[in-house]
Image (spheres, helix red, strand yellow):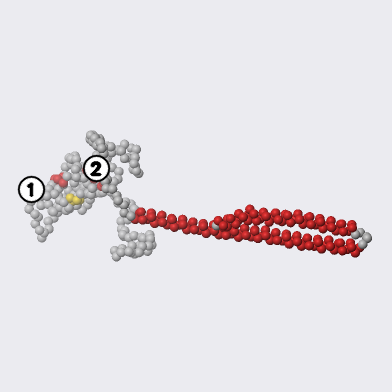
């Protein structure tokens, strides 16, 4: 590499400038030779004008041969100098090409060295990560130098409205009652979710075994007629004996769903007809009674007595039974018209088409 650089420097500094200088000198010499030859021709013509043509011709031939000789030498000298300069330029190009190839090989070698160094560094880092580390054992939790004084407990009331505005809760603008709901009000609200009705009055015992609560503005019904005596069956079993001092047990009562247990004492009920007294002689076995109580009032079981079968004719107004609506026919068949198609998916289902009467 140093020799190539030396050759390039020699060519740049010596060979090429010398060749250019030789060409310039040859140019000057050729110009002088041309002037010399031209002067020779002129002198020969002036010497031998018309005296002797043969001598003039010989002098001209001599000058021509000399001019030819100078021209040949000049051309050979110029050609040699151009060849030397071109050879120097080619040598310079070759040296530069070898220099470039050397630089290319050096660069590739350096890149290979860098890659090897990077690989060594990576392997070293991997080895560091894979090697076991000596960890110093110490306490994970360090106790503070000065222990904090515990705060004295102070009882604070619980604020139940602290989280009212958190989340998606709904806060009513109306002022709600602050009292706690009782068992009666809570059970009554679950049983009848409709609007509250005014408190009912005490029920009256009727012969059908059904109790209804009357509204405040409805007039009290008239007393029902006494039921006729039930004829005794000729071959029927004898009635059970009546104990003198022990009242018969009350009939089983079916309370309405959702009726509360804790009830305030109702007002005194109206008098019950004497013919329905529990101690009447030889009453037939009473049917089970069903308490149909509208509202949250549950009468006490001691107020009822076993009742005989209902009379044949009943008064709707007396027993507070609403009249039959006008749109309900007296005779009708229970049937349903389907409004869509359905395929049974289980054994206990029906399959039908739209418009089919079921």
Q: Secondary structure at mark 1?
A: loop
Looking at the image, which residue sits at the far right?
Answer: 51
Point out residue 322 in the picture as x, y percentages from the top left corner.
28, 48
- Give the left or right position of residue 166, taking residue 290 as reference: right
Please give the name of the residue rendered at 14% of the width and 48% of the height, measured from the top-left corner.
Answer: 305
The local crowd at label 2, few if under 14, some if 14 to 19, many if 20 or more residues have their Cα within 10 Å, is: few
Point out residue 134 in the picture as x, y percentages from the top left corner.
30, 51
Numbered marks: total: 2
Q: CA distance from mark 2 to mark 1?
A: 37 Å
Q: Secondary structure at mark 2?
A: helix
The one nearer the camera, 161 or 209, is 161
Please give the name of the residue rendered at 17% of the width and 52% of the height, measured from the top-left corner.
Answer: 288
Is 296 placed above or below 76 here? above
Point out residue 114 in the picture as x, y percentages from the top left corner.
46, 55
The one nearer the camera, 99 or 33, is 33
| Quarter in which the C terminus is drawn | bottom left
Q: Which residue is mark 1?
A: 246
Q: Picture quarter containing residue 94?
A: bottom right
Residue 22 seen in render: yes
The local crowd at label 1, few if under 14, some if 14 to 19, many if 20 or more residues have their Cα within 10 Å, is: few
Residue 216 seen in render: no
Q: Which residue is mark 2?
A: 185
Looking at the image, which residue sits at the far left?
Answer: 244
| Quarter in which the N terminus is drawn | bottom right
Point out residue 333 in the picture as x, y percentages from the top left corner.
31, 60
Q: Tell me the number on the disc at residue 331.
A: none
Dots 2 and 1: beta carbons under 8 Å?
no
Q: Picture quarter containing residue 22?
A: bottom right
The one nearer the camera, 49 or 294, is 49
Is 157 placed above or below 68 here? above
Earlier in the chain: of badge 2 and badge 1, it is 2
């Amino acid at each position: 590499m140093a020799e190539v650089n030396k050759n390039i420097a020699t060519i740049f500094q010596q060979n090429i400038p010398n060749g250019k200088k030789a060409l310039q000198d040859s140019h000057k010499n050729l110009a002088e030779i041309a002037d010399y030859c031209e002067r020779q021709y002129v002198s020969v013509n002036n010497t031998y004008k018309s005296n002797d043509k043969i001598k003039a011709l010989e002098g001209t031939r001599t000058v021509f041969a000399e001019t030819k000789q100078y021209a040949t030498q000049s051309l050979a000298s110029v050609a040699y100098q151009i060849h030397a300069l071109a050879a120097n330029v080619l040598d310079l190009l070759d040296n530069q090409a070898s220099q470039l190839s050397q630089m290319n090989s050096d660069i590739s070698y350096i890149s290979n060295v860098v890659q090897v160094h990077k690989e060594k560094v990576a392997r070293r880092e991997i080895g560091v990560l894979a090697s076991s580390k000596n960890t110093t054992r110490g306490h994970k939790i360090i106790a503070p130098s000065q222990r904090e004084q515990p705060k004295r407990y102070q009882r604070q009331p619980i604020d139940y409205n602290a989280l009212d505005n958190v989340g998606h809760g709904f806060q009513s603008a109306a002022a709600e009652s602050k009292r706690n709901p009782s068992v009666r009000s809570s059970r009554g609200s679950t049983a009848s979710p409709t609007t509250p009705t005014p408190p009912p009055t005490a029920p009256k015992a009727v012969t059908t075994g059904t109790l209804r609560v009357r509204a405040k503005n409805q007039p009290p019904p008239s007393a029902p007629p006494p039921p006729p005596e039930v004829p005794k069956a000729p071959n029927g079993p004898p009635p059970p004996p009546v104990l003198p001092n022990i009242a018969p047990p009350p009939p089983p009562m079916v309370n309405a769903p959702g009726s509360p247990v804790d009830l305030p004492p109702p007002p005194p009920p109206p008098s019950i007809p004497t013919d329905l007294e529990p101690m009447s002689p030889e009453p037939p076995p009473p049917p089970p009674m069903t308490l149909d109580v509208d509202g949250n009032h549950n009468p006490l079981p001691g107020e009822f007595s076993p009742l005989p079968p209902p009379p044949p004719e009943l008064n709707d107004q007396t027993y507070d039974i609403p009249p039959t609506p006008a749109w309900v026919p007296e005779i009708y068949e229970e049937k349903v018209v389907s409004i869509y198609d359905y395929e049974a998916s289980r054994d206990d289902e029906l399959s039908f088409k739209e418009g089919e009467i079921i």
